[in-house]
Image: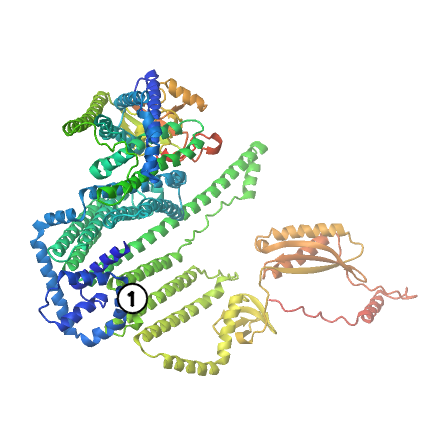
Amino acid sequence: MGGLRAYFLALVAVFLVALSGGTPSVAQMIPSTSSAQEPATVPAPSPNDVKEFLRLLGDPGIQDWLRESATSQTAAAVSADVSLRDQIEGQLAQFGKRARSLALAWSIVPDIPQVLADQWESELSTSQKVRSLTYILTFLLIGFGLEWLYRRFMDLPLLRLEQAPKDAPLEKLTGAATRAVIIFGGLLVFAIGSIGAFQSFEWHPLVEGLVLDFLTMVLMLRIILAVSLFFQAPYAPELRLVPYSTPVAKHLHWLARVLALTVVLAIALSFVLARLTAFQDMAGDLPAVFLAQTVALAIVVVLVSWGCIWVGFRRTQILAQSGCEPRLMRFWRNYLTLLVAAVFGTWLIGAFGLMWAILVIGMTVPGVKLLVLWIDHFFDQSTTALYEAHKAKAQAELDAFMAAEAEKAAEADTVSGGDIAGDAQAMTEIAPIPPIEPEFHDPYATTRPIVQRAARFVVLLGAVFALAAAWGVNIFALSEDRSLGGRALEVLVDSFVALLFADLVWTWAKTVIDKRLADYEPPVDGQAPGPEARMITLLPLLRTILLVTLLTMVSLSVLTSLGVNIAPILAGAGILGIAIGFGTQSLVRDIVAGIFFLIDDAFRLGEYIEIGELVGTVEGISIRSMRIRHHRGKVHTVPYGELKSLTNHSRDWVIMKLEFRVPFDTDLMLVKKLVKKVGAELAANEHYGPSILSTLKSQGVRRMEEFNMVVGVKFMTKPGEQWLVRRDAYQKVRDIFEANGIRMAERNVKVEIAGGEHLSEETRQAVAGAAQDAVQGPSGPPKPIPDEP
Amino acid sequence: MPDATAPGHPAVAYRRAIMISTGLILFAFITCHLTNLILGLHSVALMDKWRWVLSGLWTGPGFRQLLVFAMTLHFLTALVSLYYRNTLRLPAYDLAQMVAGILIIPLLAPHVFGIMAYADLGLVATYDLVLRFFWNLSPLDGLRQVVLLVVAWLHGAIGIYTWLRSRDGSERTMRFFYPFVVLVPILAMLGYVEAGRQVIPIAEGGTGYVMQNDPNADGMSVDGDEAADIIAKAKKDGRLVGQMSLALVALAFLARWIRVSRWKRGQVHVAYLGRRPAQFSTETGLTLLEMARINDVPHANVCRGRGRCGTCRVRVMQGADHLPPPDAMERKVLEHWNAGPTERLACQLHPSAGKLQVERVIQADYSDLDYQQTGKPSDSAQKRAV
């Protein structure tokens, strides 16, 4: 069997080679050498010779040898022996030959049924034919039976999958993919049941070939339809991945069925015909009959494709009702029609390389467009779904709030019994603020272009490989090909791939960076900037560095593939880099250190920091240095390289502790209560109240001193707010102590003067003052407390 | 089968009982016959060794009459059912069963008369002989046998499948039934093919299976002309019976068409509430389940509208007053499920003209049923109503 297939492949190869032009492949060796030796009149080889030749071609060993020798010698042969003129001549000769064989095929069209019938008769007896049919039927049924059994156990999950409501497109995608997996599992079972069961018997070779062809055809057809089902899901709208309605999906699925059936049937038939003729000598009319058959089948395929294109565009426009621009639709309809015509035309004249190029490129262009549109649609759907969910959530919150309000109002109503004044007071007290709908962020804004680029990248890469495969070029062996064409192709492929990669990376980086830049909101005056502020300084720099790097890498890789030796360039760049590096050592150090300080998030714009001796608010951050303004107006500029350590006073929270000295006879419980009250007042302050994280509270007696107790209080605020709070705290505590008869302890020196009853008041005081000085030293002006803004 | 007979008609129940009992007899015969074919995977000799049990018994006295009787009764009842069908837009399984059922007799008759002709010719219908006939002498007849095998098995399997599924505790039965119903015909076909591979080479001058102690070694007991007559007669009879059966089926269809075309039709507007809501307007005459099916509204129905399983129950929200009351059979099923007063079986409910609002009791994907506990509609096969 394997031999038969190889035989057939070899036959097709010879056939293609004899008619195709262009690519350096196994086959081209044969006509070019023979035509060089024997110009014009080539005596027709005897049938036996041809048979022997074909047998040799069918031999795997010979095939390997030919392939090897072709790859190693083609370049030399093409560049050295065959000039451009020869090539063109050869090409023209081939066209002529093709035209002659087409004419011959055309002339014998009326005889075809007869020839085929004879052929059919001589190859297979009637009972063999009917038996083949029986086998096909039997093994198809076995496949279907096993698949049905498989489906019994898969139907419930499948049904759940199809009927369950799906909101997010991602759910849809996973649902559709799971369904596809289940369906493909069924196809696998079918394949095992039909082809596998068939292959486990020994058969008459021709019968085996025929049956296998048809079984494979059915399998192929089903695979194509399963793929169509995966995207269009005509019977399960919940799983549809494409943006159109059920009628359109059903219609397009139907068209896909027709087209797939035609193409697969045509291919299977031509295989069967090839099998029939493969056993015969190539003499006689058979090759012409074969060609005529193939052309007829191709014409059928072309006609059906045209019909499908025409009907498809027409019906879709009607069914879809909206959303498709007639001009655009017309354009694509004509485009596809012309594409089919062009492919058929090039195939007919035998320019197979050209045909593949037209086919691949022609399909890639709309394919990429469709893919990008589809991804767009997919993300649109996702975003819309998320937005809906977001809105529903906000609405629910609002509703809950309203309900709570209403309940409260009703409660107040019943409690106060219609006391209007109380009601009004309640209303003003609560002052209900409805929850504001939070802003919606599209989480896919950065993913979308990347996915689009990546998809395009994959498709284009696939197209390149498909084209290479069609031309018989091994991309991975291009570097061994020293011919001009091979070199050019290699350069093109290399540069293309490098460009695509760079483009992918650049798009990703640019989208992410631009998104962050666009999202940044400069801080409102008086507020500390958020963590984004540092990135804003950094990102444009990174973007530029990335762009330059990518450009350099791409141009270097293009240069390499062009054959330019880039080692000197690299060396030059290296030397220059070292020179610049030494010269700007400290500059580089500053920049690099700065990047790391920024990444560490050590400081941000507007923060109050302390670097060694210097304190102040960060006013500016540049690439090399930062500017700090002291609260008294001095501006310090500090290069990052100089920073060893850095103290930040503006992070998260600040605790401030205050002390009051009170006499020993003070009621500490009262103090605690009063401090608490002051704390509540402070927290209720409308200006700084919200900035207080933990309001003023008493910490009790912190220590005892000679003449008094020290009562500690503390509070916690956001950075920067503590000064204001402290001011008010002192003031309020003092006031409230005074109002409640608590005296602050004062230093008083009691001087007992023995026998000094006679002294006048003034003298007593003078003595007391002298005594105080003696105890404490002269009381000068107090030391200034540390700087504060 | 959605029947339009008058509510509470006992004939419906009788007909179903007849259908399933005769069907089971025929299915048992086919199973034995196919089992005999399976032995062909080993050898033709083994097939012939077991022929007297697996096939011979059934064609012996008593059994033969039983088979013919069951077959006739089954066919006639099927004609009546055909007559009572409201719509021909059937779910795939019902359609397959119907088409297969129509095809069986025309396909089967030549085989039956052919086998009977062997006796007249004075030959024993050994597998050796019959296989040679089907694979070598007349491969077209052999092809027909494969079609017949599949068609008959399909028809019987669907019937029993539907019958089993709407019974209590079918879940366990199904676990065995599925593999059985697939493996028997597959192995039989493989056996047939393998046996063919053993006998084919002989006709082509090669070496193959030759039967030992062949009872047919002496040839026919009648002379050539008579034999030709017998063969021609068998062929003619086979054709005739096939054509007659087709004519009867056509008559049933015609009668059905006349019955349906005499309906007075009105418009009914149906709205499905709840999950996956839908609404449509359609002509009266069909059952609610058929209407839903025609309008692509998914609907749970394990027994495919035979009024047995109760999975197609709907809650009538509006328009209940002008609906016909449930018949005895429907009441029984509804009671079995402890259904509420507004619940009805969609497969038995014939909505009259006007407006109707209903809600499914059981979702189309059964997501609200706990299978394991109720043990009722254990299996999913037919839930795709659309």
Give the residue at x 24% y 42%.
B202
Work out whether A551 lies above or below A141. Answer: below
Note whether residue A732 is visible. yes
- Does A118 sit above or below residue B192? below
Identify the image quadrant of residue A454: bottom left
Residue B29, percent across and down?
33, 28
**Amino acid type, residue under disc 1 in the picture:** Asn
- The residue sitting at the right extreme is A755
Mark count: 1
Is residue A473 rendered to the left or right of residue A113? right
State the residue in front, A51 or A339: A51
Find numbered disc 1 in the image and state the secondary structure of the residue it sits on. loop
**What chain is tagged by disc 1?**
A
The residue tagged 1 is A474
Determine whether, in the image, residue A327 is placed left or right of residue B68: left
Name the residue located 28 percent from the left edge and 55 percent from the top edge. A2
- Foreground residue, B113 or B95? B113
Q: In this view, does B94 lie above or below A558?
A: above
Frontmost residue, B137 versus A781: B137
Horizontal arrangement in the rendering, residue A532 relative to residue B56 (left or right):
right
Q: Can residue A625 be seen in this view?
A: no
Q: Name the image quarter holding the C terminus of chain A.
A: bottom right
The image quarter containing residue A469 is bottom left
Residue A186 drawn at (x, y percent): 35, 44
| Colour mapping used in the image | rainbow
Q: Position of residue A663 (x, y in %)?
A: 79, 57
Judging depth in this view, the residue of B380 and A422 nearest the camera is B380
> Where residue B205 sits: x, y (%)?
22, 44
**Label 1: how many residues lie within 10 Å, few (<14), some (14-19) or many (20+)?**
some
Residue at 12% x, 67% y is A92
